[in-house]
Amino acid sequence: MPHSMLMPLEGNATQQESYRCQLEASEPTRKRAWQQVVESKIRNQAALLTSIGMDGGLLKPYYTNVRSGDTDNREGAASRIYWSTLFGKGFRRERDGAPPNNMLNYGYAILRAAVARALIGSGLYPAFGIFHRNRYNAFPLADDMMEPYRPFVDEIVYRLHIDGAADELTRDIKAQLLHILFADVRMGTVRRPLEVALTMTTASLLKMFKGETARLSLPAMAAS
């Protein structure tokens, strides 16, 4: 994760403009952005379930019915169905829960750091989120924008889990989770490594704050 930022005192007009647009973005704009993020996340969860032979259609009523700001918490409702389908009814997604929670935690930590770097690279300040807010969290915007990418981590963890991966985070498991940065991601009509796709997503968020676009560039997981 980034620990500090070095900013020039001169020639910083572009950065200043980016921060101003981010801070002055209207509440409706932030709510629309979060709506798109949530819809993309649930669509990718459904696509993952379908790709591994499960019923991704269970989530269709949720990703087709996301309101601005996700005011009725379609994300949470979909997640309960998603996790019980993916890992069984006895599984609970908890930070300190039983395996494979530990693998999910590690994969998400890698993803979160990559998102934070992409945000900063796009000229955005990660401390100001569009949905997540916590006075003790320096990266709420990273927590927001990583949501549609979480299923790419889930896919790796699912494969490891069904292959009988050890409950401990071994060196080999960590190495396989690190490959999340190179996962194949569909962005519209093109495919990009996940780390490149992140820069496309964060750049589109800045454009949305500037009023240059109404749609975020979000990842899609192709169902097979």
Image (cartoon, rainbow, N blue to C red):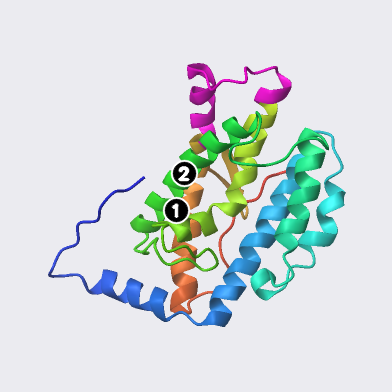
SS for dot 1: helix
Name the residue: 49% across, 65% down: 133
Residue located at (59% from left, 57% from top) = 218
User: Callout 1: few (<14), some (14-19), or many (20+) C-alpha neighbours within 10 Å?
Assistant: many
Name, please, the residue furthest toward the left: 10
Q: Is residue 113 above or below residue 35?
A: above
Q: Position of residue 114 (x, y in %)?
A: 43, 45
Residue 157 seen in the current view: yes
Q: In the rendered image, which quarter contains the N terminus?
A: top left
- Specify whether residue 166 is painted magenta: yes
* Separation of marks 1 and 2 at Cα, in angstroms: 7 Å
Please name the residue that numbered disc 2 is placed on: 195
Residue 84, quarter of picture: top right
Return the x and y of residue 126 as percentages of the image width and height.
Answer: 40, 60
Contact check, label 1 and label 2, Cβ < 8 Å: yes
35 above or below 180?
below
To which residue does mark 1 refer? 199
Residue type pointed to by label 2: Glu
Helix, strand or loop for disc 2: helix
In the rendered image, residue 158 lying in the magenta stretch gets the answer: no
Residue numbers of the magenta segment: 160-180
Q: Which quadrant is the C terminus positioned in?
A: top right
Type of amino acid at the residue the image marks with label 1: Thr
